[in-house]
Image (cartoon, rainbow, N blue to C red):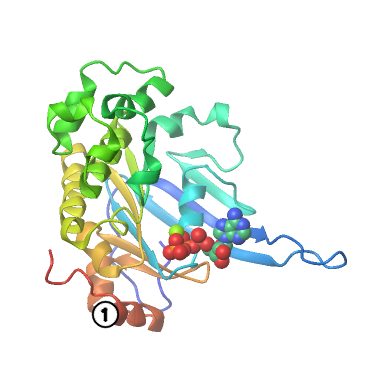
Amino acid sequence: MPTHAGTPRTEVPGEALIEVRNVTRVYHRPRTSLTRPGAAVHALRDVSLTVRRGERFGIVGESGSGKSTLLRLLCALDRPTSGTIRFDGQDIAGRPEKRLRFLRENLQIVFQDPMSSLDPRMRVRDLVAEPLAALGLPAAERVSELLEQVGLPAEAADRYPHQFSGGQRQRIAIARALAPRPKVLVADEPVSALDVSVRGQILNLLADLADELGLTLVFVSHDLSVVRHVCETVAVMRAGEIVETGPVDEIWAAPAHPYTRTLLEAVPTLEGLL
Ligand SMILES: Nc1ncnc2c1ncn2[C@@H]1O[C@H](COP(=O)(O)OP(=O)(O)OP(=O)(O)O)[C@@H](O)[C@H]1O
Ligand SMILES: [Mg+2]
C-alpha cells in the first residue's frame, strides 16, 4: 500500500479484493473554439490503492479531488484512460457490460441523495427487489428480511419513497443495495444530503451491517471525521492524487501531509454529535 513518503503505516491484514494500479482518468471539456481542442482535466493521476477483504476503506478529499471519478471506475461505470483495476483478481477496466455480472452481483452502490436514486413511482417492495430481478435472482421472502436489517417495519414495503423521511429513504437505498448479498458496498457521500440529526444513525447502520454481514466497505466523504467514524483505513485525495493513505486513527492523530492537516482543521463537523 502506498504511504506518504517516509511514514511507514501498519498494514491491514487480509487478502486484496480491489486493486487499483496507476490509474489515470482524463476528461476533455467541450471545445470552446474551432481551432483549439477542449481543455484536458486530469480527474485522477496515477492512483494506486488496495482494498482488502472485509476492510472499511474511506476516501476523503475536497470537492473536485476525484473521489466520485475513482468510485465510478471501481464500479466499472466508467473506464480509466490508463492503468488497471482488479476485482477479486479479475481485470474489470476494459470489460464489456455483459462480462461484468460477477461485479454487479458482488458490488453494490449507495448514492448521496436517496430522493433522486429511488424511483418515486415504485413501491418500496419493488425498489428493494429490483436489483434481484435485474440479476434473475429470487426476491420472495428477501424484502422483509432486508427491511428488518435496515431498521424499517415490514409495512414499509407497501409505501412509496415520498412517504418516508430522508434518513428512512437512505435506509431503503441501503436495503436495495444489500439485496443481491454483495461482498462490497460502495457509498458516495451517503449522509451529506441528510439532516445532521440522522447522519450518525445512518453511519452506525452502515458500520453495523458491515460487521454483521462481513462486508467490504468503500466509503467516500469530504469529511474526515465521518470517515473516521465508519472506516479503519483512509486514502486522502487532492487534485486527482492520493497524498496519504493508512489507518484512519493514525492519520487522524498524526497527519503526515500538510493537506490532511488542513482537512482535519476544516471539518470536525460530527464531533459531539455521534
Ligand atoms: N464527465 C466529466 N467530464 C468532464 N470533467 C469531469 C467529469 N467528471 C468529473 N470531471 C472533473 O473531474 C474532477 C474530479 O471530479 P469528481 O466528481 O470525481 O470530484 P469529487 O471529489 O467527487 O467532488 P465532489 O466532492 O464535489 O463530489 C473535477 O475537476 C470535475 O470537474
Ligand atoms: Mg463526488
- Residue 25 in sight: no
Callout 1: 10 Å neighbours few (<14), some, many (20+)? few
The x, y position of residue 179, in whole percent, is 29, 29
Which element is circle 1 on? Answer: loop
Q: Classify residue 182 by image quadrant.
A: top left
Would residue 108 be found to the left or right of residue 55 on screen? right
Instruction: Identify whether 125 is placed above or below 70.
Output: above
The x, y position of residue 191, in whole percent, is 28, 56
Q: Classify residue 63 by image quadrant.
A: bottom left
- x 29%, y 78%: residue: 264
Q: Amino acid at mark 1?
A: Ala
Residue located beneath label 1 in the image: 254
- x 27%, y 62%: residue: 227
Q: Nearer the viewer, residue 57 or 221?
A: 221
Which quarter of the image is occupied by the C terminus?
A: bottom left
Quarter of the rendered structure image containing ligand 2: bottom left
